[in-house]
Image: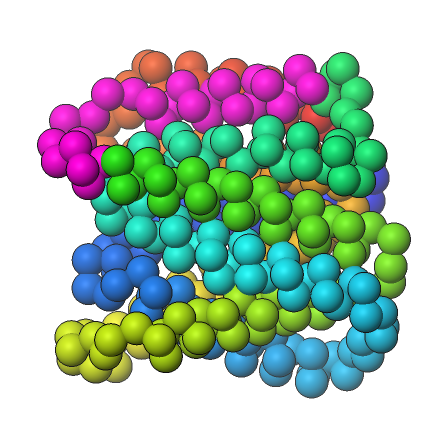
Amino acid sequence: MFADYQGELAALSSALLWAVSSVVYTRLGQRLPPLSLNLAKGALAIAMVGCTLLLQAEAIEINLRALALLAISGICGIGCGDTAYFSALNCLGPRRTLLLGTLAPPMATVLAWVFLGEGVSARSGIGIFLVLSGVAWVISERSISTPADSSKQLRGLGFALVAALAQASGAVLSRAALAETSVTPLWATLVRLSAGEAILLLAWWRQPPLPGFRLAFSVRLWAILGVTAFFSTYLAIWLQQTSLKFAPAGIAQTLSATSPLFVLPLAIWMGERVSGRSILGVVIAVAGIAFLFF
């Protein structure tokens, strides 16, 4: 049974890792600008993936079309999408940013239907709807700590929408590259990360120097960033690429968007109060996940 659902299980595992890492990234974002944070985590993850490939001595299939699609996917999803996501986190906070992030799965479903001819069954459609409803129900709960600056909220809204569209586009491009070739998820991860890092370096080179950047980096900060990059970028993106190879883009992207559900147990463990509304949202989302699996 597990072999039949390896794409779905990989997507859920990716969501779990991203949930844990998001807590750390919210804190790191207070010390580093989004572009710097994205650039640093990407560089660390590329080194990790490269070492893994050297140890495995895994050859890559030379398929120029697939490599081009993966490179464009990395530019969209990692270069643009992640930077916009971190910018939205700074403007809106995690709750609203995650809420707007639930737009990515339906966007991916529509794009996959238009460009890849990938439809979803009625049962899967119900599952996607329930998962997204449950996630939205959890993270749309009113919070006292919402930003009061309307211009900041508007900027955050723009960043969050760009992030959702970029991540959806990146997922569909990866699916197109992986579904019908023997390019492995690990090589796909390296190509996407490298392309995303290249566009970030270009943006870094063109922008004015950041005076606080060098001061912000300390040994402790690099250690925290390294551990977080290992789980959120190295492992999570590897798992995400695995999910896109073995599951339809809409389903993979939906299950990857369940990170907020995994944040709740962390909140309870950290002594935070979790409302009945949040628990109900989790139940709805889990019912949706069951529709996608059984």
- For residue 281, say whether it is visible: yes
Instruction: State whether the magenta stretch is mostly helix, strand or loop.
Output: helix
Residue 206 part of the magenta-drawn span? no
Q: Is residue 38 above or below residue 294?
A: below
**Residue 136 sits in which quadrant?**
top left
- Which quadrant of the figure contains the N terminus? top right
How many discs appear? Answer: 0
Q: Residue furthest front?
A: 206
Q: Is residue 283 above or below residue 172?
A: above
Left or right: 215, with 290 as reference point:
left
Q: Is residue 245 above or below residue 262?
A: below
Q: Nearer the viewer, residue 65 or 48?
A: 65
What coloring was used for the rendering? rainbow
Q: Residue furthest left?
A: 148
Position in image of residue 137 (x %, y %): 40, 19
Position in image of residue 141 (x %, y %): 29, 20
Residue 141 part of the magenta-drawn span? yes
- For residue 147, say whether it is visible: no
**Residue 2 sits in which quadrant?**
top right
Looking at the image, which residue is at 18% across and 37% down?
151
Looking at the image, which residue is at 63% across and 57% down?
73
**Start and end of the magenta stretch?**
125-153
- Which quadrant of the figure contains the C terminus? top right
Position in image of residue 133 (x %, y %): 50, 18
Looking at the image, which residue is at 63% across and 23% down?
128
Left or right: 129, with 153 as reference point:
right
Position in image of residue 211 (x %, y %): 16, 78
Looking at the image, which residue is at 61% across and 82% down?
51
Q: Nearer the viewer, residue 158 or 294?
A: 158
